[in-house]
Image (cartoon, grey):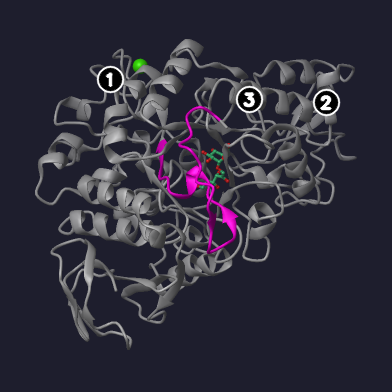
Amino acid sequence: MTAHAPPPHAAPNAASERTERWWHRATGYQVYPRSFADSNGDGMGDIPGITSKLGHLSDLGIGFIWLSPVYASPMIDNGYDIADYRNIAPEFGTLDDMDHLIAEARERGIGIVMDLVVNHSSSLHHWFQAARASRDCAQHDYYIWRDPAPDGGPPDDARAAFGGPAWTYCEEVGQYYFHFFSPAQPDLNWQNPALRAEIYDMMRWWLDRGIAGFRMDVISLIGKDVDARIYEEGPDLHPFLQEMHREVLAGRDVLTIGESWSVSIETGLLYCGRDRDELDMVFEFSHIREGWHPELGKFAPKPFDLVAFKRALFSWQDLTRDDGWHALFLSNHDLPRQVSFYADDRAHRRPAAKTLATVLHLLKGTPFVYQGEEIGMTNARFERIDQYRDLETLNHFEEQIAQGVSPEAFLAGANRNSRDHSRTPMQWNAAPHGGFTTGTPWIQANPNFGEVNVEQDMVHSESVFAHYRRLIALRKESDLVTFGHTVQLMQDDPDIIAFERRLGDERLFVIANFTAQDRERELPQGLAGQADCLVWSHTPRGEIPRSLRLVPYESLAWKL
Ligand code: TEU
Ligand code: CA
Protein backbone atom coordinates (compact mmCIF):
# COMPACT_ATOMS: atom_id res chain seq x y z
CA MET A 1 0.00 0.00 0.00
CA THR A 2 1.31 3.46 -0.80
CA ALA A 3 1.62 5.88 2.06
CA HIS A 4 -0.76 8.41 0.56
CA ALA A 5 -3.74 6.11 0.32
CA PRO A 6 -6.50 6.39 2.87
CA PRO A 7 -6.87 3.07 4.72
CA PRO A 8 -8.89 0.72 2.55
CA HIS A 9 -12.06 -0.54 4.17
CA ALA A 10 -11.90 -4.27 4.44
CA ALA A 11 -15.66 -4.70 4.15
CA PRO A 12 -16.66 -6.34 0.90
CA ASN A 13 -18.95 -4.21 -1.15
CA ALA A 14 -22.35 -5.71 -1.54
CA ALA A 15 -22.81 -4.46 -5.07
CA SER A 16 -19.90 -6.31 -6.60
CA GLU A 17 -18.43 -8.53 -3.88
CA ARG A 18 -15.28 -6.60 -4.37
CA THR A 19 -13.18 -5.20 -1.59
CA GLU A 20 -13.55 -1.47 -1.33
CA ARG A 21 -10.59 0.42 -2.73
CA TRP A 22 -9.59 3.98 -1.88
CA TRP A 23 -10.43 5.26 -5.35
CA HIS A 24 -14.03 4.03 -5.22
CA ARG A 25 -15.00 7.07 -3.15
CA ALA A 26 -12.42 9.45 -4.52
CA THR A 27 -12.83 12.13 -7.16
CA GLY A 28 -9.96 12.78 -9.55
CA TYR A 29 -8.83 16.20 -10.76
CA GLN A 30 -6.86 16.60 -13.96
CA VAL A 31 -4.08 19.16 -13.99
CA TYR A 32 -2.69 20.26 -17.35
CA PRO A 33 0.57 21.61 -16.01
CA ARG A 34 1.43 24.23 -18.61
CA SER A 35 -1.94 25.94 -18.07
CA PHE A 36 -2.55 25.60 -14.33
CA ALA A 37 -0.33 28.03 -12.41
CA ASP A 38 2.93 29.77 -13.33
CA SER A 39 5.21 30.32 -10.34
CA ASN A 40 8.04 32.23 -12.04
CA GLY A 41 6.46 34.51 -14.62
CA ASP A 42 7.79 32.78 -17.73
CA GLY A 43 4.22 32.32 -19.04
CA MET A 44 4.29 28.55 -18.56
CA GLY A 45 2.58 26.71 -15.73
CA ASP A 46 4.94 24.60 -13.61
CA ILE A 47 5.18 22.13 -10.73
CA PRO A 48 5.81 24.70 -7.97
CA GLY A 49 2.69 26.44 -9.31
CA ILE A 50 0.68 23.25 -8.79
CA THR A 51 2.07 22.81 -5.27
CA SER A 52 1.05 26.37 -4.45
CA LYS A 53 -2.56 25.57 -5.39
CA LEU A 54 -2.99 22.39 -3.36
CA GLY A 55 -5.14 24.34 -0.89
CA HIS A 56 -7.69 24.94 -3.64
CA LEU A 57 -7.75 21.24 -4.49
CA SER A 58 -8.03 20.02 -0.93
CA ASP A 59 -10.83 22.52 -0.38
CA LEU A 60 -12.64 20.97 -3.31
CA GLY A 61 -12.21 17.59 -1.65
CA ILE A 62 -10.54 15.60 -4.41
CA GLY A 63 -8.70 12.34 -3.69
CA PHE A 64 -6.10 12.42 -6.42
CA ILE A 65 -4.63 14.49 -9.22
CA TRP A 66 -4.19 13.09 -12.71
CA LEU A 67 -1.15 15.04 -13.80
CA SER A 68 -0.74 15.39 -17.58
CA PRO A 69 2.89 14.76 -18.63
CA VAL A 70 5.62 16.74 -16.89
CA TYR A 71 8.53 14.70 -18.25
CA ALA A 72 11.41 16.08 -20.34
CA SER A 73 9.99 16.73 -23.80
CA PRO A 74 10.41 18.92 -26.88
CA MET A 75 6.67 19.70 -26.33
CA ILE A 76 5.59 19.15 -29.93
CA ASP A 77 2.42 17.67 -28.43
CA ASN A 78 2.68 19.50 -25.07
CA GLY A 79 4.51 16.70 -23.32
CA TYR A 80 2.74 13.72 -24.90
CA ASP A 81 6.09 13.27 -26.64
CA ILE A 82 8.48 12.19 -23.91
CA ALA A 83 12.25 12.45 -24.37
CA ASP A 84 13.22 11.22 -20.90
CA TYR A 85 10.79 9.24 -18.75
CA ARG A 86 12.90 9.73 -15.63
CA ASN A 87 13.26 13.46 -15.75
CA ILE A 88 11.15 16.58 -15.56
CA ALA A 89 10.89 19.18 -18.32
CA PRO A 90 13.00 22.16 -17.17
CA GLU A 91 10.15 24.58 -17.87
CA PHE A 92 8.05 22.61 -15.35
CA GLY A 93 10.74 22.24 -12.69
CA THR A 94 12.99 19.51 -11.33
CA LEU A 95 12.68 16.03 -9.86
CA ASP A 96 13.01 17.66 -6.46
CA ASP A 97 10.00 19.83 -7.25
CA MET A 98 8.13 16.69 -8.22
CA ASP A 99 9.07 14.86 -5.01
CA HIS A 100 8.00 17.93 -3.08
CA LEU A 101 4.63 18.00 -4.86
CA ILE A 102 4.09 14.28 -4.15
CA ALA A 103 4.89 14.82 -0.45
CA GLU A 104 2.82 17.99 -0.05
CA ALA A 105 -0.14 16.41 -1.80
CA ARG A 106 0.09 13.32 0.37
CA GLU A 107 -0.03 15.56 3.47
CA ARG A 108 -3.48 16.59 2.27
CA GLY A 109 -4.59 13.06 1.44
CA ILE A 110 -4.19 13.66 -2.30
CA GLY A 111 -2.45 11.07 -4.47
CA ILE A 112 -0.59 11.92 -7.69
CA VAL A 113 -1.50 9.82 -10.72
CA MET A 114 1.13 10.25 -13.43
CA ASP A 115 0.42 10.19 -17.14
CA LEU A 116 2.14 7.19 -18.69
CA VAL A 117 2.75 7.76 -22.39
CA VAL A 118 4.30 4.56 -23.67
CA ASN A 119 2.60 3.88 -26.97
CA HIS A 120 5.21 6.23 -28.40
CA SER A 121 8.14 8.30 -27.24
CA SER A 122 9.51 11.57 -28.55
CA SER A 123 11.79 11.30 -31.57
CA LEU A 124 14.35 13.02 -29.32
CA HIS A 125 14.37 10.15 -26.82
CA HIS A 126 17.88 8.66 -26.81
CA TRP A 127 16.37 5.29 -27.78
CA PHE A 128 15.07 6.78 -31.01
CA GLN A 129 18.22 8.77 -31.63
CA ALA A 130 20.15 5.47 -31.53
CA ALA A 131 17.45 3.60 -33.44
CA ARG A 132 17.43 6.02 -36.34
CA ALA A 133 21.21 6.09 -36.63
CA SER A 134 21.79 2.38 -37.13
CA ARG A 135 20.01 -0.91 -37.66
CA ASP A 136 22.63 -2.66 -35.56
CA CYS A 137 21.88 -1.27 -32.13
CA ALA A 138 19.56 -2.86 -29.57
CA GLN A 139 17.29 0.19 -29.62
CA HIS A 140 16.56 -0.04 -33.33
CA ASP A 141 13.98 -2.71 -32.61
CA TYR A 142 12.40 -0.56 -29.85
CA TYR A 143 10.52 1.13 -32.71
CA ILE A 144 8.50 -0.13 -35.66
CA TRP A 145 10.50 -0.12 -38.91
CA ARG A 146 9.52 -1.44 -42.33
CA ASP A 147 11.28 -1.44 -45.67
CA PRO A 148 9.99 0.89 -48.37
CA ALA A 149 7.39 -0.39 -50.82
CA PRO A 150 8.83 -1.52 -54.20
CA ASP A 151 8.35 2.03 -55.54
CA GLY A 152 10.30 3.46 -52.61
CA GLY A 153 7.18 4.88 -51.00
CA PRO A 154 5.81 4.05 -47.53
CA PRO A 155 4.85 0.43 -46.72
CA ASP A 156 1.14 1.33 -46.86
CA ASP A 157 -1.14 4.35 -46.96
CA ALA A 158 -1.99 4.50 -43.24
CA ARG A 159 -2.71 8.05 -42.05
CA ALA A 160 -1.54 9.59 -38.78
CA ALA A 161 -4.05 10.90 -36.24
CA PHE A 162 -2.73 14.45 -36.47
CA GLY A 163 -2.71 14.47 -40.29
CA GLY A 164 -0.24 13.21 -42.93
CA PRO A 165 1.07 9.67 -43.45
CA ALA A 166 1.70 7.35 -40.50
CA TRP A 167 5.10 6.35 -41.95
CA THR A 168 8.17 8.58 -42.13
CA TYR A 169 11.34 7.69 -44.02
CA CYS A 170 14.68 7.71 -42.30
CA GLU A 171 17.60 7.96 -44.68
CA GLU A 172 20.34 6.72 -42.33
CA VAL A 173 18.74 3.29 -42.06
CA GLY A 174 16.82 3.25 -45.35
CA GLN A 175 13.52 2.35 -43.63
CA TYR A 176 10.24 3.89 -42.64
CA TYR A 177 9.15 4.15 -39.00
CA PHE A 178 5.54 4.02 -37.86
CA HIS A 179 3.87 6.83 -35.91
CA PHE A 180 0.18 6.72 -35.05
CA PHE A 181 0.43 10.41 -34.09
CA SER A 182 2.94 13.01 -35.37
CA PRO A 183 6.35 12.11 -36.87
CA ALA A 184 7.82 13.49 -33.63
CA GLN A 185 6.04 10.63 -31.78
CA PRO A 186 7.46 7.33 -33.11
CA ASP A 187 5.54 4.28 -31.86
CA LEU A 188 7.38 1.99 -29.48
CA ASN A 189 7.61 -1.65 -30.52
CA TRP A 190 5.89 -3.51 -27.71
CA GLN A 191 6.78 -6.80 -29.39
CA ASN A 192 10.32 -6.34 -28.10
CA PRO A 193 10.64 -7.83 -24.58
CA ALA A 194 13.65 -5.67 -23.69
CA LEU A 195 11.62 -2.54 -24.43
CA ARG A 196 8.79 -3.81 -22.25
CA ALA A 197 11.23 -4.53 -19.43
CA GLU A 198 12.58 -0.95 -19.67
CA ILE A 199 9.05 0.44 -19.40
CA TYR A 200 8.15 -1.74 -16.42
CA ASP A 201 11.34 -0.72 -14.69
CA MET A 202 10.56 2.94 -15.23
CA MET A 203 7.03 2.46 -13.89
CA ARG A 204 8.36 0.83 -10.69
CA TRP A 205 10.84 3.71 -10.32
CA TRP A 206 7.96 6.21 -10.30
CA LEU A 207 5.77 4.12 -8.00
CA ASP A 208 8.66 3.86 -5.57
CA ARG A 209 8.73 7.67 -5.46
CA GLY A 210 5.27 7.49 -3.90
CA ILE A 211 2.88 8.20 -6.74
CA ALA A 212 -0.68 6.86 -6.53
CA GLY A 213 -0.93 5.31 -9.98
CA PHE A 214 -0.98 5.89 -13.72
CA ARG A 215 -3.32 7.20 -16.38
CA MET A 216 -2.19 5.30 -19.45
CA ASP A 217 -2.23 7.29 -22.66
CA VAL A 218 -3.81 5.49 -25.67
CA ILE A 219 -3.04 2.18 -24.00
CA SER A 220 -5.35 0.32 -26.38
CA LEU A 221 -2.77 0.85 -29.16
CA ILE A 222 0.12 -1.13 -27.65
CA GLY A 223 -0.97 -4.55 -28.97
CA LYS A 224 -1.04 -3.37 -32.60
CA ASP A 225 -0.11 -5.42 -35.66
CA VAL A 226 0.85 -2.86 -38.31
CA ASP A 227 1.24 -5.48 -41.04
CA ALA A 228 -2.36 -6.55 -40.54
CA ARG A 229 -3.26 -2.87 -40.20
CA ILE A 230 -4.80 -3.53 -36.80
CA TYR A 231 -3.91 -0.62 -34.54
CA GLU A 232 -6.48 -0.41 -31.80
CA GLU A 233 -7.14 -3.35 -29.48
CA GLY A 234 -4.69 -5.54 -31.37
CA PRO A 235 -4.09 -9.19 -30.55
CA ASP A 236 -1.40 -8.55 -27.92
CA LEU A 237 -3.11 -5.80 -25.97
CA HIS A 238 -4.49 -7.89 -23.12
CA PRO A 239 -1.49 -10.21 -22.78
CA PHE A 240 0.71 -7.09 -22.46
CA LEU A 241 -1.59 -5.49 -19.88
CA GLN A 242 -1.58 -8.70 -17.86
CA GLU A 243 2.19 -8.87 -18.03
CA MET A 244 2.42 -5.24 -16.90
CA HIS A 245 0.12 -6.03 -14.00
CA ARG A 246 2.27 -8.98 -12.91
CA GLU A 247 5.54 -7.11 -13.35
CA VAL A 248 4.60 -3.74 -11.91
CA LEU A 249 1.18 -3.37 -10.32
CA ALA A 250 0.41 -6.57 -8.41
CA GLY A 251 0.54 -6.05 -4.66
CA ARG A 252 0.55 -2.25 -4.87
CA ASP A 253 -2.54 -0.33 -3.83
CA VAL A 254 -2.45 2.05 -6.76
CA LEU A 255 -4.96 3.25 -9.34
CA THR A 256 -4.71 2.58 -13.08
CA ILE A 257 -6.90 4.18 -15.71
CA GLY A 258 -6.44 3.24 -19.35
CA GLU A 259 -7.33 5.64 -22.13
CA SER A 260 -9.05 3.84 -24.99
CA TRP A 261 -10.74 5.44 -27.98
CA SER A 262 -11.78 2.03 -29.31
CA VAL A 263 -13.11 0.20 -26.28
CA SER A 264 -16.74 -0.81 -26.63
CA ILE A 265 -19.43 -2.44 -24.54
CA GLU A 266 -18.18 -5.73 -26.00
CA THR A 267 -14.56 -5.22 -24.92
CA GLY A 268 -14.89 -3.02 -21.82
CA LEU A 269 -14.66 -5.70 -19.16
CA LEU A 270 -11.57 -7.18 -20.79
CA TYR A 271 -9.68 -4.17 -19.41
CA CYS A 272 -11.28 -3.78 -16.02
CA GLY A 273 -13.18 -6.97 -15.18
CA ARG A 274 -12.79 -8.33 -11.66
CA ASP A 275 -10.61 -11.29 -12.48
CA ARG A 276 -8.66 -9.83 -15.39
CA ASP A 277 -5.74 -8.35 -13.44
CA GLU A 278 -5.28 -5.57 -15.98
CA LEU A 279 -6.57 -2.07 -15.17
CA ASP A 280 -8.95 -0.56 -12.63
CA MET A 281 -11.00 1.47 -15.10
CA VAL A 282 -10.97 2.96 -18.60
CA PHE A 283 -11.61 6.34 -20.09
CA GLU A 284 -13.96 5.47 -22.93
CA PHE A 285 -15.31 7.99 -25.43
CA SER A 286 -18.60 6.71 -26.81
CA HIS A 287 -20.54 9.55 -25.16
CA ILE A 288 -17.99 12.08 -26.44
CA ARG A 289 -17.98 10.80 -30.01
CA GLU A 290 -21.75 11.07 -29.98
CA GLY A 291 -21.18 14.83 -30.32
CA TRP A 292 -18.87 14.50 -33.34
CA HIS A 293 -19.77 14.21 -36.98
CA PRO A 294 -19.46 10.50 -37.86
CA GLU A 295 -17.80 11.05 -41.26
CA LEU A 296 -16.46 14.58 -41.27
CA GLY A 297 -14.94 14.39 -37.81
CA LYS A 298 -14.69 16.61 -34.80
CA PHE A 299 -14.39 19.96 -36.60
CA ALA A 300 -17.64 19.53 -38.57
CA PRO A 301 -20.85 20.72 -36.94
CA LYS A 302 -23.34 18.20 -35.63
CA PRO A 303 -26.41 18.96 -33.55
CA PHE A 304 -26.27 17.44 -30.11
CA ASP A 305 -28.58 14.46 -29.63
CA LEU A 306 -29.32 13.92 -25.95
CA VAL A 307 -31.03 10.57 -26.45
CA ALA A 308 -27.98 9.09 -28.19
CA PHE A 309 -25.71 10.65 -25.58
CA LYS A 310 -27.75 9.02 -22.81
CA ARG A 311 -27.66 5.68 -24.59
CA ALA A 312 -23.85 5.77 -24.58
CA LEU A 313 -23.59 6.98 -21.00
CA PHE A 314 -26.03 4.50 -19.51
CA SER A 315 -24.81 1.51 -21.49
CA TRP A 316 -21.58 1.81 -19.48
CA GLN A 317 -23.55 2.09 -16.26
CA ASP A 318 -25.24 -1.19 -17.16
CA LEU A 319 -21.95 -2.80 -18.15
CA THR A 320 -20.27 -1.99 -14.84
CA ARG A 321 -23.24 -2.82 -12.67
CA ASP A 322 -21.79 -6.03 -11.24
CA ASP A 323 -18.24 -6.13 -12.55
CA GLY A 324 -15.51 -3.69 -13.48
CA TRP A 325 -15.58 0.00 -12.62
CA HIS A 326 -16.02 3.16 -14.64
CA ALA A 327 -14.16 6.45 -15.10
CA LEU A 328 -16.70 9.28 -15.40
CA PHE A 329 -15.78 12.44 -17.32
CA LEU A 330 -17.11 15.00 -19.75
CA SER A 331 -13.94 17.09 -20.14
CA ASN A 332 -10.23 16.68 -20.46
CA HIS A 333 -7.28 18.40 -22.17
CA ASP A 334 -8.33 16.96 -25.56
CA LEU A 335 -11.93 18.14 -25.35
CA PRO A 336 -13.77 21.45 -25.36
CA ARG A 337 -15.20 22.98 -22.19
CA GLN A 338 -18.25 20.95 -21.22
CA VAL A 339 -20.50 23.88 -20.33
CA SER A 340 -19.94 25.31 -23.83
CA PHE A 341 -20.22 22.02 -25.72
CA TYR A 342 -23.18 20.43 -23.96
CA ALA A 343 -25.07 23.32 -22.48
CA ASP A 344 -24.99 27.09 -22.36
CA ASP A 345 -21.98 29.21 -21.48
CA ARG A 346 -23.78 32.58 -21.47
CA ALA A 347 -27.15 33.28 -19.84
CA HIS A 348 -27.34 29.94 -18.04
CA ARG A 349 -23.64 29.29 -17.44
CA ARG A 350 -23.77 28.66 -13.69
CA PRO A 351 -26.82 26.39 -13.52
CA ALA A 352 -25.70 24.58 -16.68
CA ALA A 353 -22.25 23.93 -15.18
CA LYS A 354 -23.87 22.64 -12.00
CA THR A 355 -26.32 20.42 -13.79
CA LEU A 356 -23.61 18.75 -15.86
CA ALA A 357 -21.83 18.05 -12.58
CA THR A 358 -24.98 16.77 -10.86
CA VAL A 359 -25.49 14.18 -13.56
CA LEU A 360 -21.90 13.03 -13.88
CA HIS A 361 -21.10 12.92 -10.17
CA LEU A 362 -24.23 11.00 -9.24
CA LEU A 363 -23.50 8.16 -11.65
CA LYS A 364 -21.62 5.08 -10.56
CA GLY A 365 -17.87 5.26 -11.10
CA THR A 366 -14.95 7.52 -10.27
CA PRO A 367 -15.60 11.09 -11.48
CA PHE A 368 -12.90 13.29 -12.96
CA VAL A 369 -12.92 17.08 -12.86
CA TYR A 370 -10.82 18.89 -15.45
CA GLN A 371 -9.11 22.05 -14.19
CA GLY A 372 -11.43 25.05 -14.40
CA GLU A 373 -14.53 22.92 -14.75
CA GLU A 374 -15.18 23.47 -11.04
CA ILE A 375 -15.80 27.18 -11.72
CA GLY A 376 -17.61 26.66 -15.04
CA MET A 377 -14.82 27.80 -17.38
CA THR A 378 -15.90 28.15 -21.02
CA ASN A 379 -14.58 27.74 -24.56
CA ALA A 380 -12.15 30.43 -25.70
CA ARG A 381 -14.00 31.79 -28.76
CA PHE A 382 -10.83 32.49 -30.70
CA GLU A 383 -11.35 34.51 -33.86
CA ARG A 384 -8.23 33.65 -35.86
CA ILE A 385 -6.32 30.47 -36.53
CA ASP A 386 -3.09 32.06 -35.22
CA GLN A 387 -4.61 32.16 -31.73
CA TYR A 388 -4.58 28.34 -31.65
CA ARG A 389 -1.52 26.38 -30.49
CA ASP A 390 -2.67 22.75 -30.73
CA LEU A 391 -0.96 20.73 -33.46
CA GLU A 392 -4.12 18.73 -34.15
CA THR A 393 -6.12 21.92 -34.80
CA LEU A 394 -3.35 23.55 -36.86
CA ASN A 395 -2.65 20.44 -38.96
CA HIS A 396 -6.31 19.83 -39.66
CA PHE A 397 -6.71 23.49 -40.64
CA GLU A 398 -3.96 23.11 -43.26
CA GLU A 399 -5.40 19.84 -44.56
CA GLN A 400 -8.99 20.99 -44.72
CA ILE A 401 -8.22 24.35 -46.30
CA ALA A 402 -6.23 22.47 -48.96
CA GLN A 403 -9.33 20.32 -49.53
CA GLY A 404 -11.48 23.38 -50.12
CA VAL A 405 -13.10 23.91 -46.70
CA SER A 406 -13.46 27.64 -46.05
CA PRO A 407 -11.43 29.12 -43.17
CA GLU A 408 -14.66 30.48 -41.65
CA ALA A 409 -16.25 27.04 -41.64
CA PHE A 410 -13.17 25.47 -40.12
CA LEU A 411 -12.92 28.14 -37.45
CA ALA A 412 -16.58 27.66 -36.54
CA GLY A 413 -15.82 23.98 -35.95
CA ALA A 414 -12.62 24.73 -34.06
CA ASN A 415 -14.47 27.20 -31.87
CA ARG A 416 -16.72 24.39 -30.86
CA ASN A 417 -14.37 21.47 -30.55
CA SER A 418 -10.64 22.36 -30.60
CA ARG A 419 -8.44 20.92 -27.88
CA ASP A 420 -7.17 24.41 -27.08
CA HIS A 421 -10.38 25.44 -25.31
CA SER A 422 -9.40 23.35 -22.33
CA ARG A 423 -5.80 24.52 -22.52
CA THR A 424 -6.25 28.24 -21.95
CA PRO A 425 -4.87 29.40 -18.58
CA MET A 426 -6.68 28.53 -15.39
CA GLN A 427 -8.60 31.59 -14.24
CA TRP A 428 -7.69 32.26 -10.60
CA ASN A 429 -8.74 35.90 -10.20
CA ALA A 430 -9.43 39.09 -12.14
CA ALA A 431 -5.75 40.08 -12.49
CA PRO A 432 -4.25 40.14 -16.02
CA HIS A 433 -4.35 36.67 -17.66
CA GLY A 434 -6.67 35.52 -14.89
CA GLY A 435 -3.81 35.56 -12.38
CA PHE A 436 -2.23 32.57 -14.10
CA THR A 437 1.06 34.35 -14.78
CA THR A 438 2.72 37.71 -14.23
CA GLY A 439 4.34 37.31 -17.65
CA THR A 440 2.93 36.53 -21.10
CA PRO A 441 1.05 33.22 -21.19
CA TRP A 442 2.02 30.65 -23.82
CA ILE A 443 -1.60 30.71 -24.99
CA GLN A 444 -3.98 33.62 -24.60
CA ALA A 445 -6.28 33.58 -21.58
CA ASN A 446 -10.01 33.45 -22.18
CA PRO A 447 -11.11 37.12 -22.18
CA ASN A 448 -13.92 36.30 -19.74
CA PHE A 449 -11.49 35.87 -16.81
CA GLY A 450 -12.80 39.05 -15.16
CA GLU A 451 -16.15 37.39 -14.68
CA VAL A 452 -15.21 33.70 -14.54
CA ASN A 453 -12.49 33.07 -11.98
CA VAL A 454 -11.90 31.14 -8.76
CA GLU A 455 -11.85 34.14 -6.44
CA GLN A 456 -15.10 35.47 -7.79
CA ASP A 457 -16.83 32.09 -7.86
CA MET A 458 -15.99 31.30 -4.24
CA VAL A 459 -17.91 34.31 -2.94
CA HIS A 460 -20.81 34.09 -5.39
CA SER A 461 -24.18 33.05 -4.00
CA GLU A 462 -24.54 30.58 -6.88
CA SER A 463 -21.00 29.24 -6.63
CA VAL A 464 -20.24 26.40 -9.05
CA PHE A 465 -17.28 25.43 -6.86
CA ALA A 466 -19.55 24.95 -3.84
CA HIS A 467 -21.77 22.66 -5.91
CA TYR A 468 -18.78 20.50 -6.89
CA ARG A 469 -17.56 20.41 -3.31
CA ARG A 470 -20.97 19.17 -2.19
CA LEU A 471 -21.06 16.41 -4.82
CA ILE A 472 -17.51 15.29 -4.03
CA ALA A 473 -18.28 15.16 -0.30
CA LEU A 474 -21.50 13.23 -0.90
CA ARG A 475 -19.64 10.44 -2.67
CA LYS A 476 -17.32 10.03 0.31
CA GLU A 477 -20.22 9.81 2.77
CA SER A 478 -22.75 7.84 0.83
CA ASP A 479 -22.60 4.13 -0.02
CA LEU A 480 -25.62 4.71 -2.22
CA VAL A 481 -23.77 7.26 -4.38
CA THR A 482 -20.61 5.19 -4.46
CA PHE A 483 -21.95 1.68 -4.94
CA GLY A 484 -25.61 1.88 -5.87
CA HIS A 485 -26.50 0.55 -9.29
CA THR A 486 -28.01 2.79 -11.90
CA VAL A 487 -31.42 2.56 -13.53
CA GLN A 488 -32.09 4.97 -16.35
CA LEU A 489 -35.54 6.62 -16.49
CA MET A 490 -37.27 8.53 -19.30
CA GLN A 491 -34.69 7.31 -21.80
CA ASP A 492 -36.52 8.59 -24.87
CA ASP A 493 -36.96 12.10 -23.52
CA PRO A 494 -34.86 14.42 -25.74
CA ASP A 495 -34.58 17.14 -23.08
CA ILE A 496 -34.25 15.41 -19.72
CA ILE A 497 -31.72 13.11 -18.07
CA ALA A 498 -33.26 11.11 -15.24
CA PHE A 499 -32.10 8.07 -13.34
CA GLU A 500 -32.20 6.25 -10.06
CA ARG A 501 -29.43 4.76 -7.99
CA ARG A 502 -30.37 1.80 -5.82
CA LEU A 503 -28.59 0.01 -3.02
CA GLY A 504 -30.56 -2.40 -0.81
CA ASP A 505 -33.67 -0.42 0.19
CA GLU A 506 -32.09 2.93 -0.53
CA ARG A 507 -32.98 4.95 -3.59
CA LEU A 508 -31.65 8.16 -5.06
CA PHE A 509 -33.60 9.96 -7.79
CA VAL A 510 -31.76 12.37 -10.08
CA ILE A 511 -33.36 14.58 -12.73
CA ALA A 512 -31.93 17.30 -14.95
CA ASN A 513 -33.31 19.65 -17.59
CA PHE A 514 -30.85 19.92 -20.49
CA THR A 515 -32.60 22.79 -22.23
CA ALA A 516 -32.74 26.55 -21.92
CA GLN A 517 -36.53 26.42 -21.51
CA ASP A 518 -38.84 25.36 -18.71
CA ARG A 519 -39.84 21.72 -18.94
CA GLU A 520 -42.69 20.01 -17.12
CA ARG A 521 -42.86 16.23 -16.90
CA GLU A 522 -45.05 13.59 -15.31
CA LEU A 523 -42.63 11.52 -13.25
CA PRO A 524 -42.56 7.72 -13.35
CA GLN A 525 -44.73 5.93 -10.77
CA GLY A 526 -43.53 5.48 -7.23
CA LEU A 527 -41.38 8.58 -6.84
CA ALA A 528 -43.80 11.23 -5.60
CA GLY A 529 -43.81 12.11 -1.92
CA GLN A 530 -41.66 13.58 0.85
CA ALA A 531 -37.98 13.08 0.18
CA ASP A 532 -34.64 14.34 1.34
CA CYS A 533 -33.30 16.77 -1.27
CA LEU A 534 -29.53 16.17 -1.39
CA VAL A 535 -28.49 18.20 -4.43
CA TRP A 536 -30.03 21.12 -6.29
CA SER A 537 -28.90 23.61 -8.90
CA HIS A 538 -31.38 26.36 -7.95
CA THR A 539 -33.46 25.72 -4.82
CA PRO A 540 -34.06 22.59 -2.75
CA ARG A 541 -37.51 21.03 -2.67
CA GLY A 542 -38.70 18.84 0.19
CA GLU A 543 -41.15 16.87 -1.89
CA ILE A 544 -41.12 15.10 -5.22
CA PRO A 545 -44.30 16.11 -7.05
CA ARG A 546 -46.16 13.87 -9.45
CA SER A 547 -45.60 16.41 -12.17
CA LEU A 548 -42.34 18.33 -11.98
CA ARG A 549 -41.61 21.67 -13.58
CA LEU A 550 -37.93 22.44 -14.07
CA VAL A 551 -36.46 25.82 -15.03
CA PRO A 552 -33.65 25.98 -17.66
CA TYR A 553 -30.76 23.65 -16.77
CA GLU A 554 -32.27 22.83 -13.41
CA SER A 555 -31.25 19.62 -11.68
CA LEU A 556 -32.24 17.96 -8.43
CA ALA A 557 -31.42 14.79 -6.54
CA TRP A 558 -33.51 13.31 -3.75
CA LYS A 559 -32.99 10.41 -1.44
CA LEU A 560 -36.28 8.53 -1.23
O1 TEU B 1 -5.02 11.23 -26.94
C1 TEU B 1 -5.45 10.15 -27.74
C2 TEU B 1 -6.06 10.49 -28.99
O2 TEU B 1 -6.40 9.58 -29.74
C3 TEU B 1 -6.25 11.92 -29.34
O3 TEU B 1 -5.39 12.21 -30.36
C4 TEU B 1 -7.62 12.21 -29.71
O4 TEU B 1 -8.02 11.47 -30.83
C5 TEU B 1 -7.74 13.65 -30.04
O5 TEU B 1 -7.15 14.39 -29.03
C6 TEU B 1 -9.16 14.04 -30.16
O6 TEU B 1 -9.19 15.34 -30.58
C7 TEU B 1 -3.89 11.06 -26.15
C8 TEU B 1 -3.65 12.33 -25.36
O7 TEU B 1 -4.69 12.52 -24.47
C9 TEU B 1 -3.45 13.46 -26.32
O8 TEU B 1 -3.31 14.70 -25.66
C10 TEU B 1 -2.21 13.16 -27.11
O9 TEU B 1 -2.05 14.15 -28.10
C11 TEU B 1 -2.29 11.79 -27.79
O10 TEU B 1 -2.75 10.78 -26.91
C12 TEU B 1 -0.91 11.37 -28.22
O11 TEU B 1 -0.13 11.08 -27.10
CA1 CA C 1 6.68 28.87 -15.13
For the residues labelled 2 and 3, the Cα–Cα distance comes to 18 Å
Question: Residues at badges 1 and 3 in contact (C-beta under 8 Å)?
Answer: no
Mark 3 closeness class: few <14, some 14–19, many ≥20 residues within 10 Å: many
Q: What residue type is labelled 1?
A: Thr
Q: Which amino acid does label 2 sit on?
A: Ala
Q: Mark 3 points at which residue?
A: 122
- Magenta span contains residue 25: yes
- Work out whether mark 2 precedes mark 3 in sequence or the reverse, and give the earlier one: 3
Mark 1 closeness class: few <14, some 14–19, many ≥20 residues within 10 Å: some
Q: In which quarter of the image is the N terminus?
A: top right
Tell me if 204 is positioned left or right of 93 in this view: right
Q: Residue 59 at x, y = what percent?
A: 26, 36
Q: Residue 356 at x, y = what percent?
A: 31, 58
For the residues labelled 1 and 3, the Cα–Cα distance comes to 27 Å
Mark 2 closeness class: few <14, some 14–19, many ≥20 residues within 10 Å: some
Q: Mark 1 points at which residue?
A: 440
Image mark for residue 194: 2
Work out whether 174 lies above or below 341. Answer: above
Can you tell me which quadrant of the image ligand 1 is in? top right
Question: Mark 2 or 3, which is nearer the eye?
Answer: 2
Q: What element carries label 2?
A: helix
Name the residue rendered at 53%, 50% in the picture: 20
Specify the principal SS of the magenta part: loop
- Which stretch did the figure color magenta? 2-30
Q: In which quarter of the image is the C terminus?
A: bottom left
For the residues labelled 1 and 2, the Cα–Cα distance comes to 44 Å
Name the residue rendered at 26%, 51% in the picture: 470
Tell me if 284 is positioned left or right of 429 in this view: right
- Work out whether mark 1 precedes mark 3 in sequence or the reverse, and give the earlier one: 3
Viewer-side residue, 83 vs 86: 86
**Viewer can see residue 553:** no
